[in-house]
Amino acid sequence: MTEIVRRHAENHDQRLLDSRGPTDWVHTDPWRVMRIQAEFIDGFDALADLGPAVAIFGSSRAAADHPMAVAAERLGGDLARAGLTVITGGGPGIMAAANKGALEAGGTSVGLGIEVPHEQGLNPYVNLGINFRYFFVRKVCFVKSSQGFIVFPGGLGTFDELFEALTLVQTKKVTRFPIVLFGSSYWQGLLDWAEHTVLAEGFISEADLSLVTVTDDVDEAVATLRAAL
Ligand SMILES: C/C(=C\CNc1ncnc2c1ncn2[C@@H]1O[C@H](COP(=O)(O)O)[C@@H](O)[C@H]1O)CO
């Protein structure tokens, strides 16, 4: 058995109780695990009683009058009227639009924000908000708390969320989990590349191509999500 020998000038209790001592030890990896654990506990606790919920992703940079933001606002409202909680990243753009629709329809409008430098925090349309320090904890909370994802056009953050969901569904880590791509003209290039390059190279299967539903229709997006509940 490996013996772990720690040679410190002081013991753990001394360091814990001595407020004059250096505090950099709390930033070491073992202690970081405690913060991560605390973030999971806070997140799971805050989201425990949400009921059926849908996560909406999309560009943080879309203007409020962008056609996709207009659609996201309508979708947020329709989902709320259908009794579904709307969860977003709590930021600007598509997220704010979806939260606005949900809030104004009298629904539960959740923002799972992320601490990033120079950002203004949660958008004003969130009535249940959490700010996460760790992206990966936040991602677990999105999947754990929702019954499906609707993905609007966006950039790297949106791609990250989309591919995370696709991988979880492909590997059957989550089941009955619809993924709707909203905005067919935006997503078509990616879908063509997936079919003509990725599938052609044999790096995905034919079935993987049907893991997503593509639509431009708010009613179809709502119906797809409701069918999975
Ligand atoms: C970096 C910028 C804004 C950051 N604010 C965000 N707040 C909350 N969630 C965010 C933020 N930025 C990205 N996200 C998540 O990624 C998706 C959007 O990323 P994209 O790169 O803009 O497509 C979104 O679904 C969020 O969950 C400057 O604008």
Image (cartoon, helix red, strand yellow):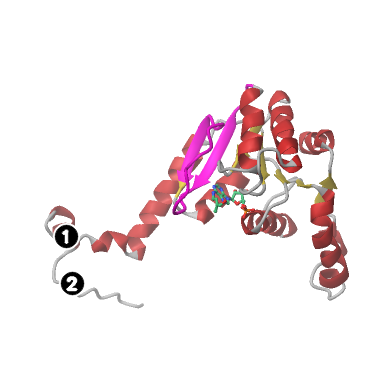
Judged from the image, the secondary structure of the residue bearing numbered disc 2 is loop
Region rendered in magenta: 106-131
Q: Which residue is mark 2?
A: 8
Q: Which residue is mark 1?
A: 15
In this rendered view, identify the residue nearer to me: 112 or 67. 67
Q: Quadrant of the N terminus?
A: bottom left
For the stretch drawn in magenta, the main secondary structure is: loop
In this rendered view, identify the residue nearer to me: 221 or 39. 221
The location of residue 128, given as percent across then percent down, is 52, 32
Q: Residues within 10 Å of mark 1 (few under 14, many from 20)?
A: some
Q: Is mark 1 within 8 Å of ligand 1?
A: no
Task: Check the image and report above or below for 50 versus 210.
Answer: above
Q: Is residue 121 magenta?
A: yes
Residue 56 appears in the picture as rendered: yes
Instruction: From the viewer's perspective, tell me whether residue 148 is left or right of residue 41.
Output: right
Judged from the image, the secondary structure of the residue bearing numbered disc 1 is helix
Q: How many marks?
A: 2
The location of residue 144, given as percent across then percent down, is 60, 44
